[in-house]
Amino acid sequence: MGEFFQLLVSGLSTGSIYALAAVGFTLLWQASQTINFAQGEFVMLPAFFILVGTHVLGMNFIVAVLFGLIVTLVLLGFAFKRVIIDPMLPHGVLPIVIATIAFGILIRDSVKEFYSAEAQAFPSFFSEETMSVFDVVISLQDIAILSMSLATIGLLQMFLTRTRTGRCMQATAQNRAVAEILGVNVNRMILYTFLINAGLAVIASVLISPIYLAKFSNGQSIGLIAFIAAIVGGFNQIRGALAGGLLIGVVDNMSAAYISAEYRTAFPLLLLIVIILVRPQGLFGTSEERTV
Amino acid sequence: MRPVVIAGLIALGLLVILPFGLKSYGIYVLTLWMVYSIAAMGLNLTLGYAGQVSLAQAAFLGIGAYTTAIMLKAGYPFFAAFGVSAGLAFCIGLVLGYPALRVQHHFLAFVTLGFNALVWLVFRNEEWLTGGTYGLMGFSRPTILGVDTSNQVVFYFFSLGIFLLLAFVLWWIVRSPWGRAFQALRENPIRANSLGVDVRRMTLLAFAIGSAYGGMAGSLFAPLVEFIDPHSFTLDTSLMLLLMVIIGGSGKFFGPILGALLVVLLPEGLRFTEGLYLIIYAGLVIVLMVFCPSGLLGVYDRLSAAVRIRLAGRQEPSGGDVP
């Protein structure tokens, strides 16, 4: 029983990081119909900006995190939207899919070529001690990660529902034309979405890199899982992406421990296929109505 | 004669002459291009004509390659293995497509993406059948009608024959009532449905035929490379095949063939840049997508339309006999 709870907590903890990436993914889709195949690389890259800050520019860790945040916001938020997505928006989903795939490769191989192909140790904000509750050993880092990501998503949800800007962003996501008629600066709202996505990527990167180390190839698996989490939860809901991320984190951990380590990655995929076939709008999603 | 026909004949002539001027590796790359072209043509039927995004073409390539390798090792003749590969890919395409096509568009992309990753896991983990990460080797190239194809040039012409045959079959499918139904689906599914096209059956058929082309490409891939392992059939390969279709121009008959040529040759051409080549390659793809989302043949269409308009504009004031 003790083992079960440990797996559950560590699953929830990594799952909450996937949820951060999945929420960003969902927001981008809602605001601009962008399916970002480079999302995993978006999570992998900020850790390297921070490492450049500490190792190359000689900053201390906190300053380097701020440096990483700013660089990520500019490159993966602003420039990504302006240079890559904007010119392609009128041409439908497919060119964006291809371009983001290529962008992912570009990021991955640039890190490999210009920084390092080796996995890099990454400092953690949190202590790596454990505590025992009854006979269950729980890592404090897991608890800290879980609360940090939940707090982030909670704040984001509050921003989107309680503030004027947040509601304008939601209006843009729901019906662009009507939002524009009502005087919402649609383009600026979409830019905010891209910036929020980049910010979420930085947080996810800082949380996940101490566990899995920072490596150029990490993005592929993170991206795939974020992707699955977003769809399983419901492609058009923040709480869906959150639930999907947590669920996938737990399923991944449990199936690796109890069923088959070899087929570990297969279980989230099977879950994905079953969900799409049985409930394509996702566990918490509402179906997207398309008019003729 | 129309310019397309002339260009096709010139290309065919080049394909017949080229192997005699190339080293063994060059011939290998050209053969690989034809193999990928076959898979990309199939994907073009699914994507370009029926409008469904599939990310599982590498899985079908792998299914064909493993089927052929296992059957060749067991001593079956090549064409039996080729037929079984095509049939198996077709059937799996039907089984996967039947439920998946209920949910269309980006959902189909996700289902096929999941399917590709699952098939890859099976290739890697089921060692008794597929040799796991060590892969399969030790099967020889087939002897066709008494001609041993283990020579690189002979195998090249053998592949060219199959490539042309499959291209012709696809050309015929696209021009048949079926093919027109596929295109009607892509352009306006609701209208097609109201005109009596069974949308679900036609998309399923397009997907299964596209998958069978993947299987047949795999069946040529195995004897060409003479060694197969799971690494050749990852999601990355599916994305590469998708890239071929889109770069060339999806929904255009010669699009995937041109796209495959570019995707196979570009890494060879950029080899001198060593570690930078993937970076340059990815950068070029982004630039192409930003400036011309409809692919290379889209650029050609746009240029030729612009030239035609300019010519027409120049003739009008002087002659006035433009029809």
Image: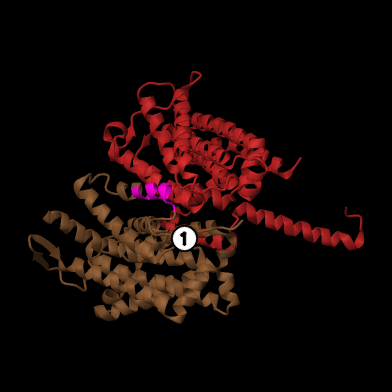
Q: Magenta includes B93? A: no
User: Going 47% across and 69% down the picture, which residue do you hit?
Assistant: A80
Mark 1 is surrounded, within 10 Å at the Cα level, by few (under 14), some (14 to 19) or many (20 or more) other residues, namely many
Q: Is residue A234 above or below residue B238?
A: below
| Residue B10 picture location, percent across and down | 66, 40
Chain B palette colour: red
| Amino acid type, callout 1 | Ile
Left/right of residue B196 with respect to residue A252 in the rendered view = right
Spot occupied by residue B308 in the image (x, y as percentages of width and height) = 77, 56
> What secondary structure is found at the residue carrying circle 1?
loop
- Residue at (50%, 29%) from the top-left corner? B154
Residue B68 versus residue A60 in the image, above or below: above
Q: Is residue A59 visible?
A: no
Identify the image quadrant of the N terminus of chain B. top right
Q: Residue at x 34, y 56 (%)?
A: A225
What is the drawing colour of chain A?
A: brown
Toward which corner of the image does residue A25 lie, by quadrant? bottom left
- Magenta segment boundaries in residue numbering: A271-280
Looking at the image, how many numbered discs can be counted on the residues?
A: 1
In this view, the residue in front, B275 or B33, is: B33
Q: Nearer the viewer, residue A239 or B238?
A: A239
Q: Main secondary structure of the magenta part?
A: helix
Q: Nearer the viewer, residue A160 or A59?
A: A160
Q: Is residue B199 visible?
A: yes
Left or right side of A256 for B111: right
**Which residue shows up at 60% across the image and 60% down it?**
B292
Q: Which residue is mark 1?
A: A35
